[in-house]
Structures are given as C-alpha cells and as structure tokens.
Image (tube, helix red, strand yellow):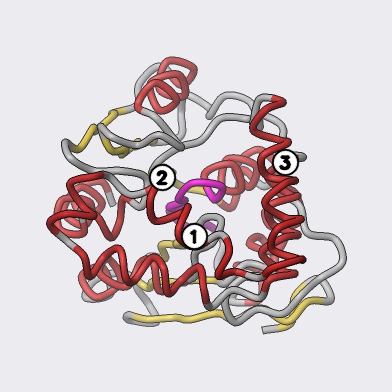
Amino acid sequence: MNVNGKELAVEIDGPEDAPVVLLVHGLGGTSNFYQPQTDALADRLRVVRVDSAGAGRSPLADDISITSHADDLAAVLDALNVDSAAVVGHSMGTLVVRELAARHPEKVSALALLGAVREPAEAGRQAQRDRAAVLREKGTGAVAPGVVANALSETTRRDKPEVAAFVRELVMRQDPEGYARNCEALAAATDPGPVPSGLPLLLITGADDKVGPPEASQEVARGHGQAAVEILPGVGHWTAVEAAKPVTELLQKFL
C-alpha cells in the first residue's frame, strides 16, 4: 500500500464489516510478531497489520521517526476507509501508537500497550545509535544474539527455544539500513504525553522485561488514571510470542 509517499506492506484478516484492530510491531519486529493473536482475533475482528517503514517487507524511507510512523498508520486507516480502530502496540510501537492517539485522536477507539517503553535516557539513546552503527558495519547477524539474550526471559530461552529461534529470525530478516534508521528513530524519541483518561487502555508486560519493565507500564497507567496493568510471570520483552495464549486472551477480553 502506498501512503505518504511510502510503500508499506499491509496485511488484513477477518470479516470486512467487522470492527477494526490495528496491530503495530516494535523495533526488530514485523507483522508476523502478532500471528498468534491474529489467528484468534480474526474470527470476529478485521485485523490490520503494517510493517513499519524500513522494517520487515516495507522498504526504506528517508524520514523514519516515531511521528512519521504514527502518521503512516493514520494514512493506512484512511486508505482503508476506517474511521477509528482499537490499536495495539509493542515496544517502540507503544511510543508510535501513543503518538498516533495524540496526533490523530479520532482514529483510536482503544489502546493496548505490550512491553511499554519510556522515552530513552541518554545512555539508551547512545545505545541505539551504537546499534545502528553496528548494523551498518556488520549487519543483523552482529546484533541478533544480543536481542535474544537480553530481551527474552531466561524462562523463555530455556523452555521455549522455538520462540528464541523465531525472534532471531525476525531480527536476522531485517534490512540492516532500515533497522539502523529505526534504531535512530528510537534514539530520537520523546514522550508522547499521557494517554487521555477517557481512552480505554490496557497494559501488558513481562515480569522479567528489562527493555520495557513493569515500572514503565505502571507509570503510563498512573498518568491515565483508569488503566489495567497485567504483569506476566516468567516473560520478557517479546510479550506476544513469549506468552502467546495469555496475551491473546487478555486482548480478546479487552477488545
């Protein structure tokens, strides 16, 4: 789909006349991150998944940022004639969907955040810039082991090696330059502000998430005032695949 001068890979599942849920992946992810949830939600919802510019099957773009990703999502909904949708975001995608709700509030009817992340501190910004440099010099193979080791829980790595393999494949299949530009987008990210209290909000995170720790979700919930926070034991940062069944059930109930 061509929006805002970019060609984006978009997948749509479920009944055409059903309410829409938009699933937004995080850094290093693709629309396939949400495959377990899509299979379940598409029975009753129209599920829209987008590979963000420079990620997965979507080619490079010059102006990759949190704001540009949010505006691209709004343009995708416009192109599909969708007035508003429930929106789910993961990791960096939680900043994107919060920006979407801030810039295009009429487009978002409910918000679910998986592994919510904060605006990076300076050390985190530098870490993302350093990762971008490694990607350009050595490719995705140089960063994939660190993603698997640091972002998945020890429990997942031990008991679900197939999940570790899948996450490694997601990272390895990224275009190095696209991944680097998205790292730089995260390095430049700013806090989108509190989620409006009138917007239904669900936060799901792993007890062992070191990237988007439970405290980050609890901060967003306090700023909202009425949000539910679900903390899943033995789960790291790749929430929707590390805990596919619990996350699916929570989203089904929320949506």
Height in image: 20 above or below 229? below
Disc sitting over residue 150 in the figure: 2
User: Which is the main secondary structure of the residues drawn in magenta?
Assistant: strand
The residue sitting at 16% across, 36% down in the picture is 233
In front here: 225 or 182?
182
User: Label for residue 25?
Assistant: 1
Q: Residue at x 59, y 82 (%)?
A: 57
Query: For residue 212, what is the image quadrant?
Result: top left
Q: Which residues are magenta?
A: 84-93
**Label 1 vs label 3: CA separation?**
17 Å
How far across and how far down the image is residue 195, in percent? 53, 29
> Could you tell me residue 102's position as x and y percent?
65, 38
In reply to whether residue 87 is colored magenta, the answer given is yes
Indicate the secondary structure of the residue bearing disc 2.
helix
**Sequence-wise, which precedes: disc 3 or disc 2?**
2
Secondary structure beneath label 1: loop
Residue 224 lies left or right of residue 92; in this view the side is left
Label 3 crowd bin: few (<14), some (14–19), many (20+), radius 10 Å = many
Amino acid, disc 2 = Asn
Q: Would you say 130 lies left or right of 206 here?
A: right
How dense is the environment of label 1, judged by Cα within 10 Å: few (below 14), some, or many (20 and up)?
many
- Quickly name the residue at label 3: 187
